[in-house]
Image: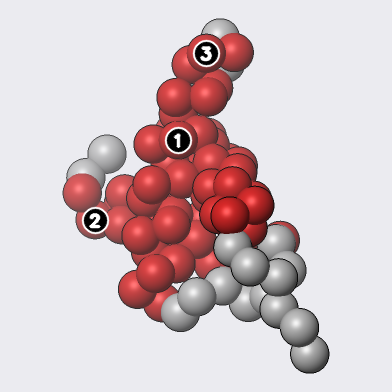
């Protein structure tokens, strides 16, 4: 898979994770970063569980799950919004 596809999958994963979690994400650039880091995190977690994914769809699923997990971890450390 080319570097371009990793960027596209990361972008889509970050966007979907922003929609799954509360709010609409953090903007295009941060969603891209969250998606890429989520892909790495998801791949690591899936590896620990003995789950292997292949192809673009498998990479997307792994990245979305990892990005949602990353957003959840970040929300644990962020201050609640009053208002």
Mark 1 → mark 2, Cα distance in angstroms: 19 Å
The circle on residue 65 is none
Q: Residue furthest right?
A: 83
Residue indicated by mark 2 = 4
The residue under label 3 is 48
- Specify whether residue 64 is in view: no
Left or right? Give the position of 50 relative to 2. right
Q: Nearer the viewer, mark 3 or mark 2?
A: 3
Tags 1 and 2 touching, CB below 8 Å: no
Tell me if 10 is positioned left or right of 14 in this view. Answer: left
Q: How many marks?
A: 3
For the view shown, which residue lies furthest in the bottom direction? 83
Q: Quick check: can you spot residue 26?
A: yes
| Image: 8 above or below 2 | below
- The quarter of the rendered structure image containing the N terminus is top left
Position of residue 42 measured from the top left corner of the image (x, y, whole percent): 50, 34
Write down the quadrant of residue 28 in the picture: bottom left
Q: Residues within 10 Å of mark 1 (few under 14, many from 20)?
A: many
Could you tell which of marks 1 and 3 lies nearer the N-terminus?
A: 1
Query: Residue at the spot x=44%, y=54% of the render?
Result: 35
Looking at the image, tell me whether mark 1 or mark 2 is earlier in sequence order. Answer: 2
Foreground tag (1 vs 2): 1
Q: Residue at x 56, y 72 (%)?
A: 25
Disc 3 residue crowd, few under 14, some 14–19, many 20+, Cα 10 Å? few
Q: Secondary structure at mark 3?
A: helix
Mark 2 secondary-structure assignment: helix
Screen quadrant of the C terminus: bottom right
Residue at position x 35%, y 60% in the image: 33
- The residue labelled by disc 1 is 41
């Amino acid at each position: 898979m080319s570097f371009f596809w990793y960027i596209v999958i990361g972008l889509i994963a970050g966007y979907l994770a922003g929609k799954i979690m509360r709010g609409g994400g953090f903007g295009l650039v941060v969603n891209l970063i969250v998606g890429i880091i989520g892909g790495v995190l998801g791949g690591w977690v899936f590896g620990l569980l003995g789950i292997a994914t292949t192809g673009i769809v498998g990479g997307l699923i792994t990245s979305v799950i990892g990005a949602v997990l990353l957003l959840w971890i970040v929300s644990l450390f962020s201050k609640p919004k009053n208002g």
